[in-house]
Image (cartoon, rainbow, N blue to C red):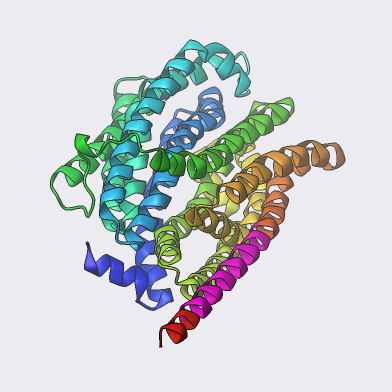
Amino acid sequence: MGNKQTELMGNAPVSTAILKLSIPVVCGMMVQVLYNLVDTFFIGRLHDQNQLTAASITTPVFMILMAISTIVSTGAASYISRCIGRKDSERANRTLTTGVMICTALAVVAMSAGLLLIKPFVMALGASAEVYPFARQYVMVMLLGAIPVMLSFTGGQMLRAEGAAMPSIIGMMIGTVANVIFDPIFIFGLHLGILGAGIATVLGNVAALGYYIWYYLSGKSILRIKPSYLTRDKAIWKEIFFIGIPACLSQLLSSAALMTLNNQAKAYGDTVLAGMGVSSKLAFIGTFIFMGFAAGCQPLIGYNYGAQNYKRVREIFKTGMMMTCCIGIVLTVVFWLFADGLVAFFTPLPEVVIQGARVFRISIFAFVILGPQMLATTGIQAFGKAKESLILSVARQGFVYIPLLFLLQSWMGFTGLIWAQPIADAITLCLGLAFLKVILKKCTREDSSDHTDAEDTARESD
């Protein structure tokens, strides 16, 4: 069962394993960032603040679709990694096939519900009367493309779960290249504006999904998707939903928090919203780097946790957190120095540049702690700890971030809105580290007890 991949996850030096599994995923995440930045770049060339604002406030739509697909991409991926670690390929195959079916059904539900409630949904995003028509166009296209958007994201995650990081990246690259090609054609060539950007994004996901389907059908993957593997096994469904739902809640709360932020910032004008939108897209660069490291480490953690190699699990966390913290410091310094130029690259509107750079310089302080925080959360998901995952998911963007938005705005005004996220991430990191310490301490204690019982049994048999 993929000896090279299992050898890498189980026996290679930890730093080597982390880099080999994470760097391809980070590169793929950068490709994913391009999905967001490319649309913003081309829409910015329209010199239309309303369309740029619409592109900014509709980000939660994409996040919601990703959140729903996370039920499968995280829940199933976590269980697949642990099954591979236990050499249980049959169960891994059943989890993969069942997960794909569940994701497809969830996409249909999301699309139907979204189209039915599209008007109140777009208004809830924070759209003003001038921005609403453009925001509605983009949202409608994204909802109609929910199936390929969600399945392409899930397909990449499933491949990473079995250690096949590079094919996952290739699929993302295919999707991004398609998006880059289609954007100018639909936005400018066919004069569709933001509607064309949405169509290009969906078609990019269709291209990525096509590659993943080909990869699985070609037999190149360790695991297989077959109708015969579809199962009603309650244990598999439980693993998918018990781990996937907390991860989904985290993403949904991120969307809800962003919608809350947009509605609070709306009082400061559409220029501020447009600047925030460009800033948030740029911040995705750092966020997705850390997501890549966390996603790359997830199968590594899950495999060794499933194999009860707790010493190696500890080393993975220690090394990974050190790496991401150092990267966060470098990114913060570089982005602080070049904030104005980076924002100006995406919009020629001076006032939007000023507001965007201001927001960006504050939000990047989260980078120093975001990597360790994501690694801690992803690691707990890889352990299959549903309760702890749920608490972390709800805490970061729910119990911590949203209250901070209101508290800090009342204290510091608009600046307080931007400082809320770095502070929320710091609090969540502390909580995640506390959970990790308790879980690993318990595992070590149980492992020692098992060894003692085995030695006692051996003595009695002698």
> Magenta residues?
432-454
Name which residue lies at 51% across and 68% down.
Answer: 320
Judging depth in this view, the residue of 32 and 63 nearest the camera is 63
Q: Quadrant of residue 278?
A: top right
- Left or right, 412 with respect to 192, comes to right
Judging depth in this view, the residue of 168 and 381 nearest the camera is 381
Is residue 394 on the magenta stretch?
no
Q: Indicate whether 265 appears above or below 192.
A: below
* Residue 415 visible in rendering: yes
Q: Quadrant of residue 332?
A: bottom right
**Place of residue 343 in the rendered image (x, y in percent of width and height, measured from the top left):** 55, 45
In the picture, the quarter occupied by the N terminus is bottom left
Farthest residue in the right direction? Answer: 411
Q: Indicate whether 219 appears above or below 148.
A: below
Q: Quadrant of residue 292?
A: bottom left
Name which residue lies at 39% across and 78% down.
Answer: 13
Q: Indicate whether 407 appears above or below 362.
A: above
